[in-house]
Image (spheres, rainbow, N blue to C red):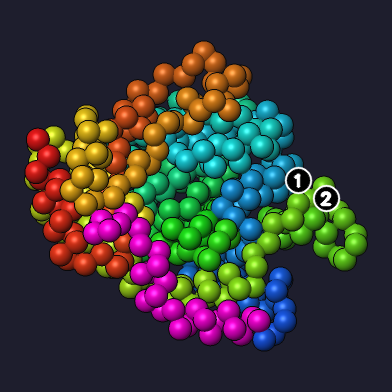
Amino acid sequence: DNMVKLLDLQAITMMHGNEYRAAVNRVIESGWFLQGNENKQFEADYARYIGTDECIAVANGLDALYLIMRAYKEMGFMQDGDEIIVPANTYIATILAITKNDLTPVLVEPTWDNLEIDIDKIEEAITPKTKGVMIVHLYGRVAYNDKVGEICKKHHLKLMEDCAQSHGCSWKGVKTGALGDAAAHSFYPGKNLGAFGDAGAVTTSNPELASIIRTLANYGSQKKYMFKYVGMNSRMSEPDAAVLYVKLKYLNEDNKKRQELAAYYYENIKNPLITLPARIADENNVYHQFPIFCERRDELQKFLADNGVQTLIHYPIPPHHQECYIEAAWNKPQLSLPISEKIHEQELSIPMNQVILMEEAKIVVDALNAFK
């Protein structure tokens, strides 16, 4: 199997295998597996890294997204039926978190060159029911600019960030996860910062919000066997926290390797049938994925597979075309979102991670350039 893998988790894990073994052993020997020192240590370290006062470790990225809006509902900022503006071309989790809270997603198109929400289209989507804007730093590219911050202040909206793909990315020196009022992070194993299973976190500098999220995630309990809210169970395991604490030390270095690979791709992919996303400053992109676009995407994917290059589509079907949402009131009459649909029809993610060797990168480039 000589494929250049999209993501070689085994090789990535082996880079620091002994440190992970030591971390997990430390947990085994402590005999403490939930809500212990490893969680406290990782939360403190990650909050410091992101630049927020608070970090709440939870079970996964979807829970992190859900808990932010659920906490805002408990605080009285949002109620059933209120609207949240969200990019149309995001992963389903962003939309699920909104609808699971009985809130209404208002889908706004991305821009074709940045692939992120079109900030110039946000204001026209605001209604009296709008309570928040959820920006998604998709593919590792920053979705924020000063204008979206100003719009949210002017209209008294909560600015929430979905940072599932943007660990270590920043805007003018401020990390994603510290740009808005609250942010959700996923540590799914394939992320730039990945756990050994599902894990997530919320970062915020609002102490009341943080306290409510922490309580909601612990069955709604602040004090053992006393329940203030109808809560849920969403916690990060101690082994995962221990592993993430080790991984965080290498995040900037890993991202730098991704950026070097991306630079090589930008300089060497030369095929008129293939479009690359507009290049943005490295500070604003940690290349969780490297998306390319082709009108004959499915043919290209097969051609690459035949030439030893593994790829994946992010994502084949946009949220508003998913079976689970076809009958949703907010999706009627069937939304017309041509830019989002074009992205879903043409996007292909090529191998991108910190362990790809230069000779592998060359195989990828040569295969792309050979497609006719």
Q: Which residue is mark 1?
A: 74
Q: Position of residue 42 (x, y in %)?
A: 57, 73
Disc 1 or 2, which lies upstream in sequence? 1
How many numbered tags mark residues here? 2
Residue count near mark 1 (Cα–Cα under 10 Å), binned few <14, some 14–19, many ≥20: some
Q: Position of residue 27 (x, y in %)?
A: 64, 81
Q: Which kind of residue does numbered mark 2 sit on?
A: Tyr
Residue 158 can be seen in this image: yes
Q: Position of residue 55 (x, y in %)?
A: 60, 65
Q: Position of residue 19 (x, y in %)?
A: 47, 83
Is residue 372 left or right of 199 when viewed as pictured?
left
Q: Which kind of residue does numbered mark 1 sit on?
A: Glu
The label on residue 281 is none
Residue 295 position (above or below residue 179): above
Q: Which residue is mark 2?
A: 229
Residue 7 within the magenta-colored segment of the rendering:
yes
Marks 1/2 in contact by CB < 8 Å: the verdict is: yes
Stretch of the chain drawn in magenta: 1-28
Q: Which residue is nearer to you in this view: 260 or 10? A: 10
Residue pictured at 51% horizontal, 38% vertical? 92
